[in-house]
């Protein structure tokens, strides 16, 4: 197969500041494809210890220490050729464009496999492809709640997570908060939250929806027969060829299931990416629930709540010979009506978790008094917005300016 050339368009701005002989570097940019369409959730690494991803608009921000100036900046994205450049060679105004590298379906159709057998092998090979012992993840977390364009909450946190490994599915992962902030209050003005409810314990919900560890209603044994699977093509992932498999619930299944795409390495059957939404075929059977919210007396207050959609995205990266999660995103949409409160709109709740570092040997203290409770609500209220709040941390650059969000919160 003829390999496509790689051109890069990463609008990168580098600022170097010298303080007491120590260089601090900040790189900001945006990544697009050959049609100048921004690429979301692209993996960006500096050496082996620092990483970030682009946000939904293709933008990113990453910090570089003086010790990393001799390292390289690496960019990888499913379906595109990897790119690497020494940090010291980066120049202000460097523009990078990623060109898709896709294997045609004709090149794999002769393989004597079915989509169903590929999924089965992926489940069977989980112990070989993923860490079986506990490991530590350092990550940046963001959760947002809003009704239409009106923000109800906006919380961020730096987390350490003890992942119990991919074979001990009954033992719960543990979360420790390093730093947090919430824009539920601006100055003395509280956010107008008509539900009088709080987003609680969502990081645990995100982790429990790791499809590799908890196949559940996607690849669980009780659900495989309820889906149709189709090999849709293949892509290159870090130099390895991978199947692209599309799935949807079968016609006639009277249940709210899912429709999506999973990417699986051909040689090892490792799942490296999965994206899915609520299938249009089963939306009529979707439960009227708000999974992320405390609902003390919503029904008694006259609220009508109907689930409209649910989306999930998970991506994994290879470190040595194992695959580890590096990005999770969950978003739910519910139609909410309440005549008395004059509410008629879509309630959006989203949570995203980016993993910036993996320690194969956990280092943090996960004693009971340090671990985040299941029902924890991020409540470190921020009176004023500060661009420097996450100084020293790698984070997901927000798709919209936090200052703009703060103004919206202030006006509610």
Image: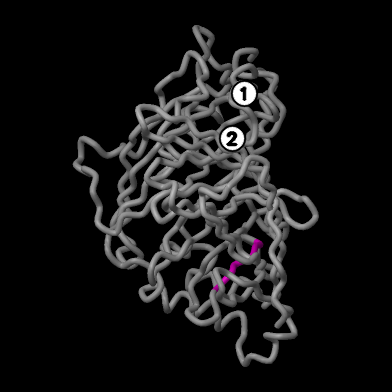
The quarter of the displayed image where residue 92 is located: top right
Quadrant containing the C terminus is top right
**Residue 66 occupies which quadrant of the picture?**
top left
Q: What range is drawn magenta here?
A: 259-264
Q: Is residue 351 above or below residue 109?
A: above
**Residue 103 at least partly seen:** yes
Q: Position of residue 243 (x, y in %)?
A: 61, 76
**Numbered label attached to residue 251:** none
Q: Residue furthest top?
A: 188
Q: Are marks 2 and 1 in contact (CB under 8 Å)?
A: yes
Front-lying residue, 95 or 161: 95
Q: Main secondary structure of the magenta part?
A: strand
Q: Secondary structure at mark 1?
A: helix
Q: Percent x, y for residue 94?
A: 66, 46
Q: Which residue is mark 2?
A: 398
Position of 291 compared to 99: left or right?
Answer: left
117 versus 379 height, above or below: below
Q: Nearer the viewer, mark 2 or mark 1?
A: 2
Which residue corresponds to mark 1? 405
Is 10 situated left or right of 51 in this image? right
Quadrant position of residue 379:
top left
Pinpoint residue 314: horizontal percent, then vertical percent: 53, 56
Query: SS class of the residue under badge 2?
Result: loop
């Amino acid at each position: 197969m003829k390999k496509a050339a790689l051109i890069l368009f990463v609008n990168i701005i580098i600022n170097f500041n010298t303080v007491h002989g120590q260089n601090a570097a900040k790189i900001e940019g945006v990544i697009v494809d050959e049609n100048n369409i921004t690429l979301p959730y692209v993996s960006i690494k500096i050496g082996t210890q620092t990483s970030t991803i682009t946000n939904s608009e293709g933008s990113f921000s990453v910090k570089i220490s003086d010790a990393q100036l001799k390292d390289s900046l690496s960019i990888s994205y499913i379906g595109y050729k990897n790119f690497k450049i020494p940090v010291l060679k980066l120049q202000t105004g460097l523009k990078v464009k990623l060109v898709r590298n896709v294997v045609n379906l004709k090149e794999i159709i002769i393989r004597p496999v079915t989509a169903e057998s590929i999924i089965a092998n992926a489940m069977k090979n989980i112990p070989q492809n993923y860490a079986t012992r506990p490991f530590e993840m350092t990550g940046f977390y963001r959760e947002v709640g809003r009704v239409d364009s009106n923000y109800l909450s906006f919380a961020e946190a730096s987390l350490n997570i003890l992942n119990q490994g991919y074979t001990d599915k009954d033992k719960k992962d543990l979360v420790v908060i390093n730093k947090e902030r919430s824009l539920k209050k601006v100055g003395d003005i509280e956010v107008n939250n008509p539900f009088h409810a709080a987003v609680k314990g969502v990081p645990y919900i995100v982790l429990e929806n790791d499809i590799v560890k908890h196949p559940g209603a996607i690849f669980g044994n009780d659900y495989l027969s309820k889906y149709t699977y189709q090999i849709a093509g293949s892509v290159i992932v870090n130099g390895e060829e991978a199947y692209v498999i599309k799935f949807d619930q079968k016609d006639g299944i009277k249940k709210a299931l899912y429709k999506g795409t999973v990417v699986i390495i051909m040689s090892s059957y490792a799942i490296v990416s999965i994206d899915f939404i609520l299938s249009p075929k089963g939306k009529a059977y979707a439960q009227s629930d708000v999974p992320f919210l405390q609902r003390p007396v919503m029904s008694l207050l006259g609220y009508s709540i109907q689930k409209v959609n649910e989306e999930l995205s998970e991506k994994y990266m290879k470190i040595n010979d194992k695959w580890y999660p590096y990005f999770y995103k969950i978003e739910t949409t519910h139609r909410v009506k309440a005549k008395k409160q004059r509410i008629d709109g879509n309630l959006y709740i989203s949570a995203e978790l980016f993993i910036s570092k993996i320690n194969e040997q956990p280092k943090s203290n996960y004693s009971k008094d340090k671990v985040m409770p299941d029902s924890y609500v991020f409540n470190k209220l921020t009176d004023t917005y500060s661009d420097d709040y996450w100084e020293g941390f790698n984070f997901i650059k927000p798709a919209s300016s936090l200052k703009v969000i703060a103004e919206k919160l202030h006006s509610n």
